[in-house]
């Protein structure tokens, strides 16, 4: 059958096994994951915790806008778009709320691991939360 080989071709090069670990961002846990799983661990930081941590640095009047901007980034259909939106948000916070900007930048890319993997829909939503079985 012409054309079947092109559709069934496997990716070239060695594939390395990986494990996806969803964490709240604790530094001790992150260090332990690196020590135990080394390069095999893909870490997804909990987006709920990240949003809460960033918003905690803001006055009440700014929280809704920043929360909405983070939600928009986390709903983006590509890693590149999500990263750009978060970086733009951090830049917009630099002058008025530098601690919120710093909190957003800390571990930013690890909040986008599921986007980098191309995961979407219910699976992406579940993996971006803490303790998926309870939320």
Image (cartoon, helix red, strand yellow):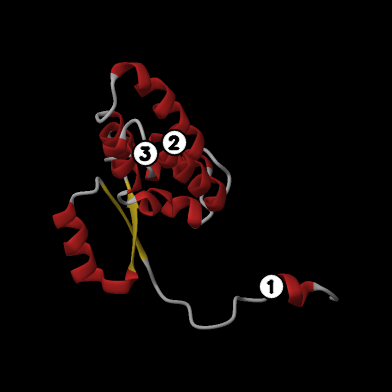
Residue 94 shows which numbered tag? Answer: 3
Where residue 56 sits in the image (x, y, percent)?
25, 29
Q: Residue 47 appears in which quarter of the rendering?
A: top left
Q: Is residue 126 visible?
A: yes
Q: Residues within 10 Å of mark 3 (few under 14, many from 20)?
A: few
Q: Residue at x 35, y 23 (%)?
A: 63
Q: Which residue is mark 1?
A: 8
Q: Say which of 114 and 59 sits in front.
A: 59
Helix, strand, or loop for circle 1? helix
Task: State the mark number for residue 54.
Answer: none
The dot on residue 92 is 2
Residue name at image x 36 percent, y 35 percent: 95
Q: Is residue 92 left or right of residue 4?
A: left
Q: Residue at x 40, y 28 (%)?
A: 67
Q: How many numbered marks does the figure carry?
A: 3
Q: Provide residue 112's location: percent of width, then percent of height.
A: 43, 50
Is residue 133 in view? Answer: no
Dividing the picture into quarters, in which one does residue 76 lie?
top right
**Label 1 vs label 2, nearer the camera:** 2
Q: Secondary structure at mark 2?
A: helix
Q: Secondary structure at mark 3?
A: loop
Q: CA distance from mark 1 to mark 2?
A: 46 Å
Of label 3 and label 1, which has the lower sequence position? 1
Q: Nearer the viewer, residue 107 or 121?
A: 107
Foreground label between 3 and 1: 3
**Outermost residue toward the front in this view:** 95
Classify residue 1 by image quadrant: bottom right
- Residue at the outermost right position: 2
């Amino acid at each position: 059958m012409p054309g079947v080989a092109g559709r069934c071709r496997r990716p070239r090069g060695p594939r390395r096994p990986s494990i996806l670990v969803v964490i709240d961002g604790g530094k001790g846990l992150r260090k332990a994951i690196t020590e135990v799983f080394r390069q095999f661990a893909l870490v997804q930081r909990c987006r709920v915790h990240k949003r809460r941590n960033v918003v905690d640095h803001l006055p009440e009047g700014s929280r809704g806008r920043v929360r909405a901007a983070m939600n928009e980034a986390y709903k983006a259909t590509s890693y590149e778009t999500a990263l750009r939106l978060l970086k733009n948000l951090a830049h917009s916070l630099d002058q008025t709320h530098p601690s919120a900007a710093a909190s957003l930048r800390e571990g930013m890319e690890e909040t986008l691991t599921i986007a980098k993997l191309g995961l979407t829909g219910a699976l992406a939503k579940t993996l971006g939360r803490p303790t998926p079985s309870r939320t």
